[in-house]
Amino acid sequence: MQQLLNTALVGLTLGMVYAAFALALVLVWRSTRVVNFAQAPMAMVTTFVALVVIESGASWWLGLVAALVSGLVLGAVLERAVVRPVQGGAQINAVILTLGLFIVLHALAAVVFGNRYRSFPAPFGIRGLEIGDRTVALTPTGVFTIVAVLVTMALLVALFRFTDLGLRMRAAAFNQEVARLLGVRVGRMLTLGWALASLVGSLAGVLIASGSLVHPGFMDSVVVFGFVAAVLGGLDSPIGSVVGGLVLGLSLSFVSGYVASQLVPLAALLILVLVLLVRPGGLFSTTTARQV
Amino acid sequence: MRTPTPALPDAPLTRHLLLAVLGLVVVVLVLQGASDFRRFQLAEMAYLGIAAGGLTVLTGLNGQVSLGHGALMAVGAYTAALLLPDLDASVPLPLVLLAAAVAALVVGAVVGVAAARLHGPYLAGATLALAVAVPGIALYFKETLGGEQGLPVVLPDIPGWVLDAAYFLTGQDLTRSGYVALVGWLTLVVTYVLLANLSRSRVGRRWRAVRDDEVAAQLAGIDLGRARVSAFVVSAAAAGAAGAVLALSVRLAAPSSFTLNLSLTLLAAVVLGGLGSLTGALAGAALLTFLPQVATGLGTDAGLSDIQAAELAPLVYGLVMVGVVLVAPAGLAGSLRLLVVRRRTRAALSTTSKGTAT
């Protein structure tokens, strides 16, 4: 019983981070029809920025702000400089481009920040909370992770639902031509979409790193799990990506706790293949049938 | 209209076989003159080239991106390791290579069937998961697959007739590293002949049709799923053979050889060389083999530490990969070909316009 509860709590915390990461992928996919495989190294780079800020004596919170701001800038710059030129071309070019960015950011981080593992401080304690006379696997930092992701999601929903800017962004993602005719600066909206996604990814990066180790490759498995989570939800649905993230976090935690931690990536692959065999468009997809 | 006499016969099979024989002669001559270190590098180029050739067929001809070819190479390498545990193992090398290709083919078929319903980013994601999942399997089955340390691969003794033939042809004794490089390049030539013929055949035309326009291909009666699966399976088999050559070359099948990095590097080779051209894939493999040494050397000269300098090579091919997509989406080989075609068209146009003017 104790182990069941703990496994579920660990899964929930992890699931929240995967959900945030999946949300970042979905934001980019919805606005530019690109799966940004470079999302993980982008988040890794901004997490290193946070680490540098923290190690220079600033507080954890200032580090987080530095990561979020640099994420915002990095996303906007990459969209403008690299992704914009291949927009509308063959999809394979965009995929290869983000993979090229993946390699570049990885190598760059290893040259600049070094290739060894470095510990990243946590904002709160990393010892399990005590409930009654038992210690459960929910740490204060874990609670903060869950709250931070929930708040971010609420803010995003508010942005897209209730603001003029959000409406314009949705219009630009929905149909560029029509949006342009209606006076939406589509290019700016797409840049903003990338910047926001990169910000959410950076948040996920810092949350994963907190109380743990960072290394140029520390986000690589997260891109796989985040992608699987996004596909579970159907790549097009923000709510789907959150649900997908939680489902994946919980199932992987159970695989890790009850089977073997080495098989976690394999389990992710199996879940992905099974879902895609049953529903190629994801669980939350609205399928448009096309007959030839 | 005058038709230029072709330098090579027109029938694809004859031409490919002729090129293959020519290539083999060059390979034997180069290997004979090379040092043992160079031979090791040439073996590396051979296995990267084989895998890149397979990936070229998949990505270039069929338009599917796979990030899991490193994992398929791992399947081939572990197959070879299981078949060659010690010197007493009596499985002949051609059979080992074949078994490695078949094992990867089976895994590729399973993934391919799932992948056939996917395309673009979904397929890339599924194969990405494959790349990350496979090393975990080797870690989990410690007893049979050796865990973190991996499995040793024992290179069988060189058969007497090969030694004799090598001495007869080159006047030199064949070293073990020379033997591995020779096996690697023989495999490469065989693979490339098969892939080249396949791509010129009806199957290859179907792959291209699916890549260019799914709807039109379906209207023409092509089974999209079957075309996709067959491309994936063929490409996986090549990756398996490449994995076996890798295992023979480094005498080890260990999870650390088959990281996500390897899969991405293979894709880089294919993109750099030019999507869809086997020559391009080979050029890309050559770049991957020889660039790291040069880049690392330049880096340490510039005062970087060894670890930092080692990252310069991936930095360079990452940058080139981005640059190629932005500037020359046809890759090196494709861009050259485009340049030649454009010049010819221009020349042809200028002569015809002169003709009408006078």
Image (cartoon, rainbow, N blue to C red):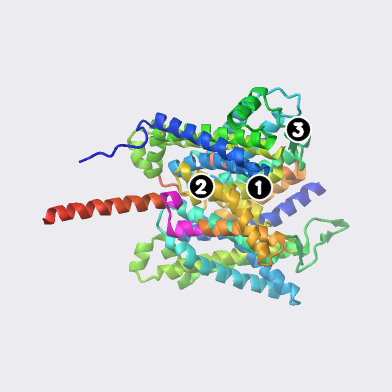
Q: Earlier in the sequence, mark 2 or mark 1?
A: 1
* In this picture, residue B129 sits left or right of residue A81: right
- Report crowding for label 3: few under 14, some 14 to 19, many 20 or more residues within 10 A (C-alpha): few
Name, please, the residue furthest toward the left: B358
* In this picture, residue A112 sits left or right of residue B19: right
Query: Where in the figure is residue A173, as x and y percent of width and height?
Result: 44, 62
Q: Are marks 3 and 1 on the same chain?
A: yes
The residue segment tinted magenta is: B322-335
Taking the spot 67% from the left edge, 64% from the top edge, the residue there is: B301
What chain is tagged by disc 2? B
Q: Which residue is mark 2?
A: B283
| Count of numbered badges drawn on the protein | 3
Rendered position, B66 above or below A217: above
Q: Amino acid at mark 3?
A: Thr
Q: Earlier in the sequence, mark 3 or mark 1?
A: 3
Q: Which mark is residue A104?
A: none
Q: Which mark is residue B144?
A: 3
Pick the front one: A197 or B56: B56
